[in-house]
Image: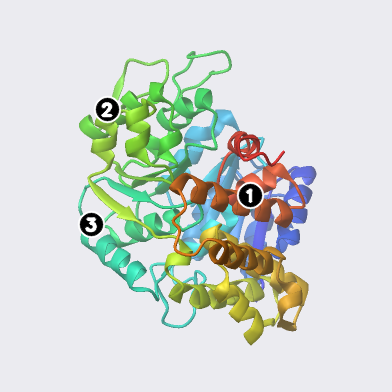
Amino acid sequence: MTENVLVVDDEFRIRRIVEMALSDRGFRVTTAASAEAAEEILTKDTVDIVVTDLQLPGRSGLDLLSHVRRTQPEVPVILITAFGTVESAVEAIKAGAYDYVLKPFSVEELEALVVRALDARPGAREMQPPAAAQDGVIARSAAMNKILTMVGQVADAPTTVLITGETGVGKEVVARALHRRSARREQPFVPVNCAAIPGELLEAELFGVSKGAYTGAVKDRPGKVEIADGGTLFLDEIGDMPLSLQPKLLRVLQEGTVERLGSNTTRRVDVRVVAATHQELPRLVQDGGFREDLYYRINVFPIHIPPLRERPEDVEALAMAALERFTERMGTHATLGAEALGRLKAYSWPGNVRELMNVVERAVILAGGGVIDDLELPRQIFLHREDEVADESAAPGTVRPLSDAVASAERAAILAALERTQDNKAQAARLLGVSVRTLFYKLEKLDLR
């Protein structure tokens, strides 16, 4: 069944843009221009998620949130808000909203938030085949089951957790599983990608802004640390956090206090921090790119997620789960042919789970309601494996330098993302989980211009 998104905004242009973007993604979209109209739709139609502007004519988005929480508490609500009303959005999150986006927002950002909100619903299938997943993590391999055991052991401790692994292995999925198993599960889970936000904006995003801190700061605004008070703050790609901000994060971890940009007022917060990175933090520390004291403070309980090529037992389960997820979302009945499944299991997946999800989504679209075979699989599924075999036969028994192996994997992942997005750099960066700036740096470094 295709999930129905209710979009509520009094501006026709925004309703239309969001409707087209989410429809292209495979959702069924219903729109309303007011809270009253939205409530009428909620009484007549099945709605899976509500996306609403905070400022509406008549009753506000907060009133609509209250109505949804009272009548359909299982339906997540995402708020669209302007800079000046962020405090209201924060209060709404504490009152049960899933998250908010700031105007002006990108439709890709909103799409990703909608998908995450739907996957976070209690009882959601979360890409899982029958009896396969725990807390959204599909674990057929011994390695992933060991990780789930570790998650259970540390979930209720106040300990800071550092999740490491290559891009696309599912670090945020594990972080969310940890939050859901903890006593903080009813409080906010607040993700921040340190690589996706320019350094000059990351301080305000994380720690908040005091009125008058800079031109345009006309009102106090809390940061993500304060929004996560009582819950979990997930700092993805923490290795990309500027050195200048690391002492402020260290203070949050050591003293449980935060100061907004431009303010000397100290605020107490109760936040459980889970950090993640694909980088080698010890090397960054050695090179002076990361504070040693902060590294030891976040590396209290490390969890390493191995790449998908090292746990082939998970490939079939992940592929079948993704197939179920995307066919349901798109309202089709595609099935995975045996030969295509064999190809997926033989591939080494340099882009890890994220690449597998993208390949299956593309195949479902191309296959329509039929059987997915080799024609629906991208060419790298065939070429990459043949190149690997050729390399192995050319130099039997040799060991490649680690830097060469990493560069080869990065090159393959970037090429796959560029092919998947028809050379759209911004979309490719999102698929790879890096900033556009990082992608251009990699293109230059790997001579892929």
The residue singled out by tag 3 in the image is 154
Q: Position of residue 110 (x, y in %)?
A: 63, 49
Disc ID at residue 322:
none
Q: What is the CA distance from the residue labelled 3 to the residue labelled 2?
A: 22 Å
Quarter of the image that includes the N terminus: bottom right
Q: Is residue 13 left or right of residue 345?
A: right
Q: Position of residue 62 (x, y in %)?
A: 53, 46
Q: Amino acid at mark 3?
A: Val
Name the secondary structure under disc 1: helix
Q: Is residue 212 above or below residue 389?
A: above
Res. 74 in view: yes
Name the secondary structure under disc 3: helix
Q: What is the CA distance from the residue labelled 3 to the residue labelled 1?
A: 34 Å
The residue singled out by tag 2 in the image is 251
Q: Is residue 186 left or right of residue 75?
A: left
Q: Is residue 41 left or right of residue 267?
A: right
Q: What is the CA distance from the residue labelled 1 to the residue labelled 2?
A: 37 Å
Q: Amino acid at mark 2?
A: Arg
Between 446 and 323, the one nearer to me in the picture: 446
Q: Are the two marked residues, 3 and 2, in contact with CB atoms closer than 8 angstroms?
A: no
The residue singled out by tag 1 in the image is 414
